[in-house]
Image (cartoon, grey):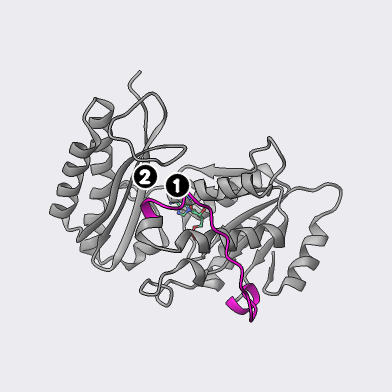
Amino acid sequence: MQTVNTLRMLRTALAQLRVENATIALVPTMGALHEGHLTLVRRARSEADHVVASIFVNPKQFGPNEDLDAYPRRLAADAAMLEAEGVAVLWAPDAAAMYPDGFATNVSVAGVSDGLCGAARPGHFDGVATVVLKLFNQVAPDMAFFGEKDFQQLAVIRAMARDLDLTRPHVDAIIGVPTVREADGLAMSSRNRYLSPEQRAAAAVLPRAMQTAAAAIAGGTGAAEAMGALETELIAAGFTSIDYATLADAASLAPLEVLGAAPARLLVAARIGGTRLIDNIAINPAA
Ligand code: AMP
């Protein structure tokens, strides 16, 4: 595996990979890797000849009072994990390489960015879209892998890819990968390491409460009632606040009050102390 941190080095490394129509898959990350990230890498390896992984803690997607400085950085350990998974190139620029002096462009995907995490974290999805578009231009991958863990992010990237012709027409080259969970159901996240043992135990209530709410909604309970019960359960378990708990159309992310015929998603963002956890699950209409 080659680890590169300048665009010039990246281009040289990519030129070595791009021979005889070899395909390249991109797996963007912010590092502090866990099994969720490695599952993306394994999927990417199974579908492309070469995998380029990126590690960049993107300042543009953090708000002024968020955890940019505290975000875990473990480049050496991450690189060893990626190398063991057969990644060809690790692209690990610093902020000055990604955003040189005078950088002035912002990419904003209206609509799908607006609610949920976009409402709770103003500017977050502009930061995500801007860096992901740059990564696409830098790497020019044939396909790219993203986790359903960040369901709204995946929707934003799909919309941007469609709008800006990032991928070939009629080819779904933005590939979503189901959320990888701990044994007790908690979605794996780099931020889980912020949790104290007591908070970690409380966090496991989130996926359980979401399953309960999903079953109620699938059985005909309205979203407001099911979400009210879910919020009560989270607060009782030790969560300190809930940013949102929403039933939404799985494609548009528009909020729903009752489950219809179309696929729906239950999405939650909630805080335990200073740690913000997000999760989402599918809700399928009863057969
Ligand atoms: P991050 O490093 O948090 O920006 O995540 C990098 C990529 O890994 C994103 O596409 C995430 O959606 C994905 N990811 C993070 N956690 C998980 C997980 N538990 N399961 C599947 N994918 C994940």
User: Which tag, 2 or 1, sits closer to the chain's start?
Assistant: 1
Magenta-colored segment: predominant secondary structure: loop
Residue 17, percent from left and from top: 79, 57
Residue 68: say if magenta: no
- Of the pair 131 and 83, the residue shown nearer to us: 131
Residue sticking out furthest to the front: 110
Some atom of ligand 1 lies within 8 Å of the CB belonging to the residue at label 2:
no
Secondary structure, mark 1, is: helix
Query: Answer yes or no: do the residues labelled 2 and 1 have beta carbons within 8 Å?
Result: yes
Please tell me whether residue 26 is drawn above or below residue 31 in the rendered image. Answer: above
Mark 2 and mark 1: Cα distance apart in space: 7 Å
Q: Quadrant of the N terminus?
A: bottom right
Q: Which residue is mark 1?
A: 151
Q: Residue at x 77, y 61 (%)?
A: 14
Q: Which mark is residue 280?
A: 2
Q: Residue at x 17, y 43 (%)?
A: 228
Q: Which residues are magenta?
A: 95-117
- Of the pair 212 and 198, the residue shown nearer to us: 212
Label 1 sits on what residue type? Phe
Residue sticking out furthest to the top: 287
Left or right of residue 22, residue 271 in this image = left
Residue 92, percent from left and from top: 62, 70
Please tell me whether residue 219 is drawn above or below residue 121 in the rendered image. Answer: above
Residue 108: say if magenta: yes
Secondary structure, mark 2, is: strand
Label 2 sits on what residue type? Asn
Left or right of residue 89, residue 192 in this image = left
